[in-house]
Image (tube, coloured by chain):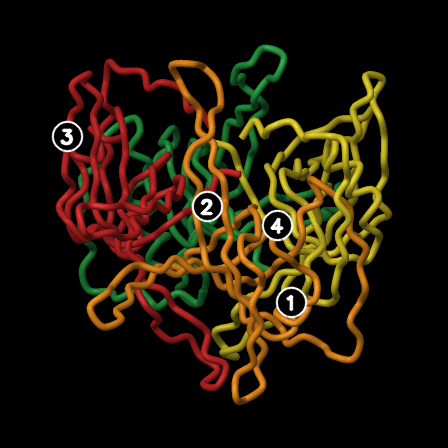
Chain colours: A yellow, B orange, C red, D green
Amino acid sequence: MTDNITLVGVVATPPKSMQTASGLSIVSFRLASSQRRYDRTRNAWVDADTNWYSVTAFRQLADNASASLAKGDRVIVAGRLRVRSWENGEKSGTAVEVDADALGPDLLFGTTSFTRVAGRTPEPDAA
Amino acid sequence: MTDNITLVGVVATPPKSMQTASGLSIVSFRLASSQRRYDRTRNAWVDADTNWYSVTAFRQLADNASASLAKGDRVIVAGRLRVRSWENGEKSGTAVEVDADALGPDLLFGTTSFTRVAGRTPEPDAA
Amino acid sequence: MTDNITLVGVVATPPKSMQTASGLSIVSFRLASSQRRYDRTRNAWVDADTNWYSVTAFRQLADNASASLAKGDRVIVAGRLRVRSWENGEKSGTAVEVDADALGPDLLFGTTSFTRVAGRTPEPDAA
Amino acid sequence: MTDNITLVGVVATPPKSMQTASGLSIVSFRLASSQRRYDRTRNAWVDADTNWYSVTAFRQLADNASASLAKGDRVIVAGRLRVRSWENGEKSGTAVEVDADALGPDLLFGTTSFTRVAGRTPEPDAA
C-alpha cells in the first residue's frame, strides 16, 4: 500500500529548483518536523527529537512552491513517503523522502495572500 | 485512537469568524473534497463523489485563516475527524466535522506571499 | 485527493456478508471509534464522543473478514472515507463510510492465530 | 505535530521480544512495505521500491504481538514515525522507526482466530 504521510514542519533549507531536459519542473528542500511526546512520569507533553525529510514537488506545484516558500516557513505537506538506501563509493546511507501531492504554508504563525496562476490546467492526480 | 485525517479540497462557503465570550477565536467553513476512483473496467481514473466537511479552526490559526482564506480557495487541512449525531426538534442528522491542527492554501493552482503575525506566541499543541 | 483514513475501534454490529450477482464478495459492519481529547483546564486526557462508521470490504478481504471477525472485536481499518448524502422517500441523511484497503484484529487486548487461505491470489490494489 | 503513519506490509524478521529491568515488554521487527506507483507512460500501476521500517510495540501490545506474529505475516501498523540519526564509532546512519499504537494481522491473505487475554486492563493511550 502507498505509505501516505502528512507532515507539518519548517522549511530548513532554501528550496532548490531544477528542470529536467524534458522540461519537468522539480523543487526540493529539507523539512524539520519537531515531535512531541507524552511523558507519563511528568504527566505532560515534552519536546522529543526532530524528524528530517527531503521533500520534493513536481510540475506546477513545484513552480508555485518555488515562487512562494522560503527557508524558515512553516508548511503542510501531504505526500508519499519513500525510504531509500543509497551508495556512493565507500559511503552508504538511508534517505527519507516525501513526494508531495499537496503543499502550502501553514497559517499558524501568519497570514497569506493568494494569486492564481493562469493558463495552465494541472494534470489530474494519478492518485 | 484519535481519528486523524488530511484533506485537500475547496473552501465552499465564505469562512465565518466568531469569538466566544471568553475571547476564543473560531473560524469555520464547508470544505468540498472531490474523490477519484480507479475504474477497473476502463483501466482509468474517473471522478467519484465529493465528500463534504465542516472545518473548524481555533485561536491564532482561526484569526490567520480568517484573514487569508476565501470561498473558492484550494486548501490543505490536517486535523481530527468528528462524526456527530444531532437533533433539532423533529429533525436529526449526522454532522461530519474536522478540527484543524494545521491549515493553509495548497500551492497547486497559484502562489502565496506570507506575512508573519507578530506578538503572539502560539500555545504548544496538545498533540 | 483520496480521503484516506485509519481507524482503530470496535466492531459494533455482527459483520454482514453478501455476494453480488456477479459473485463479488462484500462484508460490512458498523465501527465505533472512541475519541479522547486533551483537556487544557484539567491537564489530562478525557473521553470524548464516539465516531461511528460503516465499514465495507470486498473480494478476498471480505471473505476472510467474514470468517474472522465478530461483534465486540477491536480492529484496525485502513481505507478511503466516503461522506454520502442519501434520500429515502421523505427521509434524508448523511452516511459516513469507509472502504477498507486493509483490515484486521488489533492485538491490544488479545492474541490471534493466522491461517493462510490457499488458492486465490488477490488482485493487485488499484492504489 | 506528531508524524502519524499507517503501514501495511510484511514482517521481514522474526519478532524479537525484550523486557526492561523495570518489567516493560518490548517487541520489535523489520517491516517491508512494497510501494506501487502509477506509470503515466504505460497508464498502469507498476511495482516501485520497497520501504523498510523498524517497528516497535510496548506493554500488552508487545506481549500479544510476540505471541501472534511471525516472519512472513502481512500486518497493519498504525503509529508514530521517528527518523533518527545514529553514530557508532566511525559509522553513522539514519534509522526509520515506527512506534506502534495499533498492530495486527491484515486479513487479505488469510483468516485469524482471536483469543482475549484476561486479567490485564491496558493503560489508556496517551494519544
The chain letter for the residue carrying disc 4 is B
Crowd class of label 4 (few under 14; some 14 to 19; many from 20; radius 10 Å)? some
Q: Which of pointers 3 and 2 indicates the residue nearer the eye? A: 3
Q: Secondary structure at mark 3?
A: strand
Q: Is label 4 on the same chain as label 2?
A: no
Cα separation between marks 2 and 1: 45 Å
Cα separation between marks 1 and 3: 47 Å
Residue that label 3 marks: C18
Residues at marks 4 and 2 touching, judged by CB atoms closer than 8 Å: no
Q: Nearer the viewer, residue C105 or C101?
A: C101
Q: Nearer the viewer, residue D62 or A65?
A: A65
Amino acid marked by disc 2: Ser
Judge left or right: residue A25 versus residue B94: right
Cα separation between marks 4 and 1: 14 Å
Residue B66 badge: 1
Judge left or right: residue B93 versus residue A10: left
Q: Is label 4 on the same chain as label 3?
A: no
Q: Is residue C49 above or below residue C57?
A: below
Q: Residue at x 39, y 41 (%)?
A: C78
Q: Which of pointers 1 and 3 indicates the residue nearer the eye? A: 1
The chain letter for the residue carrying disc 1 is B
Amino acid marked by disc 4: Gly
Residue A18 badge: none
